[in-house]
Image (cartoon, helix red, strand yellow):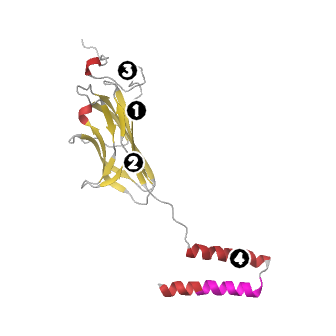
Amino acid sequence: MQIIVNKKKFLIIGTLAIFIFAGVTPAKASLLDNIINGIKDFFTPNSTPSVTAQIDGQISLAENGDLNKNNQIDAGEIITFTFKITNTTDKAYEMATLRTNVAKGKINFIHNVQGATGIDTKTEYVEIPYVNIPPGQVREIKFDARINYFTDNDTSLSVEPELITSDKQTLLKGLQQLKTVKKTFKDKIPSNVQMR
């Protein structure tokens, strides 16, 4: 390897010497400029842009989910969980699981699942199995759910998404997003469902 690099250096230096001693004309100046730039690139190669993957989670009111129209997330209302996985690497993520870290005990009536084949119901947190993201792609996964009425003091709802392998190794981890639910059990929103 060292011999090849030394031969390249000798070839470049020799070519430069010929141009310098033979006289530089305007036509040769452009060629000389290209050679010098090539030498700079050879000895200090450009850094390659970083390729990364990332995952983000978001909680928002679902369309028509704000039952009392106060633009706040209240217990009993429908919210949308959105997860965006961006893969700018040259590696495919296959058969991974999206662990949302949304506690199932804080929501119910999970519906309107988009961008996924379903939801794993065997875990304490909402998990979405069989997630595939090819290189250079973006995958958005969404679902709606109703917020439970809280009887304890913890009225927060959060997401902290992770993409994990089948053997539970973390591939990607997103930042936590926390939302406070404005209503508690004692001042819950009346149901819109009327029983007959």
* Residue tagged 3: 67
**Residue placed under numbered mark 2 in the picture:** 55
| Pointers 4 and 3 in contact (C-beta within 8 Å) | no
Contact, mark 2 vs mark 1 (Cβ under 8 Å): no
* Amino acid tagged 2: Ile
Identity of the residue drawn at 38% across and 57% down: 92
| Label annotation for residue 31 | 4
x%, y% of residue 26? Answer: 79, 76
| Secondary structure mostly seen in the magenta stretch | helix
The picture places residue 149, in percent across and down from the top left corner, at 26, 25
The kind of residue tagged 4 is Leu
Rendered residue at 35%/27% (across/down): 78
- Callout 1, which amino acid? Ser
The numbered mark, 3 or 1, whose residue comes first in the sequence reads: 1
The first of marks 2 and 4 along the sequence is: 4
Q: Residue furthest left?
A: 122
| Mark pair 4, 1: CA separation | 59 Å
Q: Mark 2 to mark 3: distance in Å?
A: 30 Å
Alpha carbon distance from label 2 to label 4? 47 Å
Q: Which residues are magenta?
A: 10-23
